[in-house]
Image (spheres, rainbow, N blue to C red):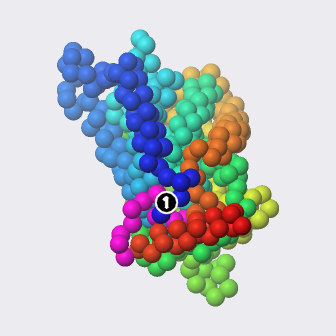
Amino acid sequence: MTDPATNMRLKLPLTCFILEIILIVLFGVLVEYDDETDARKWHNLNHTDYDNDFYYRYPSFQDVHVMIFIGFGFLMTFLQRYGFSSVGFNFLIAAFSLQWATLMQGFFHGMHGGKIHIGVESMINADFCTGSVLISFGAVLGKTSPVQLLFMAMFEVTLFAVNEFILLSILGTRDAGGSMTIHTFGAYFGLMVTRVLYRPNLDKSKHKNCSVYHSDLFAMIGTIYLWMFWPSFNSAITAHGDDQHRTAMNTYYSLAACTLSTYAMSSLTAHDGKLDMVHIQNAALAGGVAAGTAGEMMLTPFGSMIVGFLAGIISVLGFKYLSPVLEEKLRIQDTCGVHNLHGMPGVLGAIVGAVTAAVASRDIYGKGLEDVFPLVANETRDASFQGGIQAISLAVTLGIALLGGLLVGFMLKLPIFGAPRDNICFEDSIYWEVPGEEAHHEDQLAAVTTEEATKLNS
């Protein structure tokens, strides 16, 4: 028996078909290959095939793509009865978001003669935008319908592109790995949405808002994939050569140091000294987030390790002590703890980027200053001013994320989107056909629905 309120028989097909038809039409009217993708244009250029940007960028793109579809998807499978939805809805909203992001980012960054030019770099940027949406998905995991998620993605991608344009194009902010544009934005947007969608009776689903042995093991698959590929994520769109090399290396050492501090803090904060798998799955990745903004800068391996070390400590403390306070006092029900993995480490990364930018000089960077801080290199602004711009960019990101999340959250409260009731959250069988041996969960849902109907009639 299916609850009529959550029946997706018409809602989901109509939403998917309408959105995809709109995307196809817009792509047909507005999108075309860039010079390195178009057969006629590329062969008119005086280059060898191996000069094509595809050969420089595609390995990084593929790593980022794996992170989006496997890393983020499996990281969220820790809920004992929500594995189908974690991976499946991640797949759905990622596939939609990368298409919509291509258009939205193209409107602001890639218009040439009224057309959006796309190539391998636009594919990477679209995946970056999608990553921000999936971070927000983690905050509302288990409490939203697929239709709600698609509409959230549509509005968030649009606001992401606006924020990215303001920071990168208008303010001249440097944020290669997206500590601000991806992680901070996605985390605080999602936190505001889940605050507006606060469920006062969510404790009725508390017994399902937890993990079991095998679900935590599946979530560790996502963690390991993210951990391995994060150097590619942060370095994917940096300048060729030393910049990309340096970004990958800084991220590499930040993650390693973060992992050690995560294990240490997880054991230290437990009364019996036992490790908490939630901490390991999430906080060990915070070093990649925190190294995002300053990754391409001359942070040095020493500085990268300090950043990662601090990120691991902050993240574990957030999971242990701050998350319960946010839920109890501020009514922010953050399912995946995105505030601890993406929010606070993202803010840390932005601060590190601002400080590192403020002390940049020709003596430190040499001719490489043109790649990392072009406006400082051509003396349009000095390093201290660039550092101030980096700090202002953090405030702008937080403002757009919080206000945008507030507005989108109120829109998603409309009953037409088919959200699950408080007492049946974190359950796959609401929206999925489940294997036969688990069919008794359908019976449980039917019993709950029948019981409530009886109470209403009486």
What residue is drawn where x is 46% and y is 39%?
15
Locate residue 456: give its quadrant: bottom right
- Judge the density around disc 1: few (<14), some (14-19), many (≥20) Cα neighbours within 10 Å: some
* Residue 310 can be seen, yes or no: no
What residue is drawn where x is 64% and y is 88%?
272
Front one among 327 and 304: 327
* Residue 203 can be seen, yes or no: yes
Q: Position of residue 81 (x, y in %)?
A: 48, 69
Q: Amino acid at mark 1?
A: Thr
Q: Is residue 173 left or right of residue 82?
A: right
Does the segment drawn in magenta span residue 439?
no
What residue is drawn where x is 21% and y is 21%?
39
Front one among 422 and 248: 422
Answer above or below: position of 30 versus 227.
Answer: above
The magenta-colored residue range is 426-437
* Residue underneath mark 1: 2
Q: Position of residue 126 (x, y in %)?
A: 44, 37
Report the residue that reaches farthest toward the bottom: 272
Does the segment drawn in magenta span residue 431?
yes
